[in-house]
Image (tube, grey):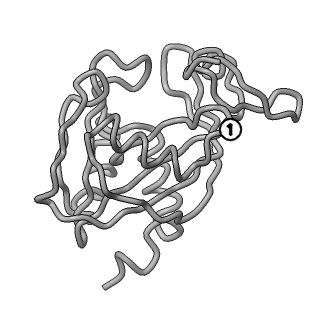
Amino acid sequence: MTEDMIPAWVDGTLQPIDKLDVHRRGLRHKAVSVFVMDGENVLLQRRAAGKYHSAGLWSNTCCTHPRWLEPAADCAVRRLREELGITGLYPAHRDRLEYRADVGDGMIEHEVVDIFMALAERKMQVTPNPAEVAQVEWVGFYDLTAEVARRPERFTPWLRIYLGEHKDRIFGTLMRP
C-alpha cells in the first residue's frame, strides 16, 4: 500500500483511498494539523508552489493526512520531521474538529482533523523540505488572526476556519490575557 492511500469514509466505512481521489470526490477523511508555539508566536509555513492544492498559501506549522492505520500522534511527529526537519517535539493532542472546504481546482477537503500543539523555542532547528514548504515564519498569534481577517486569500482555507470558528477550542487559555 502506498503512502498516497489515506483513511477515508466511503458509505460509512473507513478504508484506504488514494489521496487525490479523496479530494476530487470530496470524501470525508482523517487529517492531522500541528501548531508549534513559542509563547504567543506561531510557526507558520507557506506551502510549496508544487503542492497539488493550496500552493503558495500560508498555513499552520504542518498539516497532512495519516497513512492507513497510522496513529494521529505518530503522523504529527513524522510530518514535522518530513516537512520541516523538526525533531525532538512530541505534540500534545488539543482537539478533533470536522470541516469541509473548497480548496480549488475541483478539490474538496472534508476532514476529521486531529489538532496537535507543541511548545518550542524560536531558536530550534527548522530545515524546510522545499518540495513541501516554500518559507517559514514565526508570527504573533494576535497579528496572525488580524492578518487572516484582513487578507484571507493569503491563507489556507483550513487555517481560516481554525482561527475563525475554532480558535478557543484549539488555543483555549493559551491565548487569553
Residue 79 position, x and y percent, is: 41, 40
Q: Residue at x 36, y 81 (%)?
A: 176
Give the vertical position of 14 relative to 41 (above or below): above
Residue bearing mark 1: 69
Residue 47 position, x and y percent, is: 30, 30
Secondary element at tag 1:
loop
Q: Residue at x 64, y 35 (%)?
A: 110
Question: Is residue 101 shown left or right of residue 138?
Answer: right
What amino acid type is highlighted by mark number 1?
A: Leu
Question: Is residue 167 shown left or right of residue 110?
Answer: left
Residue 107 position, x and y percent, is: 56, 20
**Quadrant position of the N terminus in the picture:** top right
- Depth check, front residue: 82 or 9: 82
- Where residue 29 sits, quadrant-wise, is top right
Residue 49 position, x and y percent, is: 27, 19
Question: Is residue 150 shown left or right of residue 2?
Answer: left
Question: Is residue 133 shown left or right of residue 171?
Answer: left
Give the vertical position of 122 relative to 127 (above or below): below
Q: Residue at x 62, y 54 (%)?
A: 97
Q: Residue furthest bottom?
A: 177
Total count of labels: 1
Q: Residue at x 69, y 32 (%)?
A: 7
- Where residue 177 sits, quadrant-wise, is bottom left
Classify 10 Å Cα crowding around label 1: few (below 14), some (14-19), many (20 and above): few
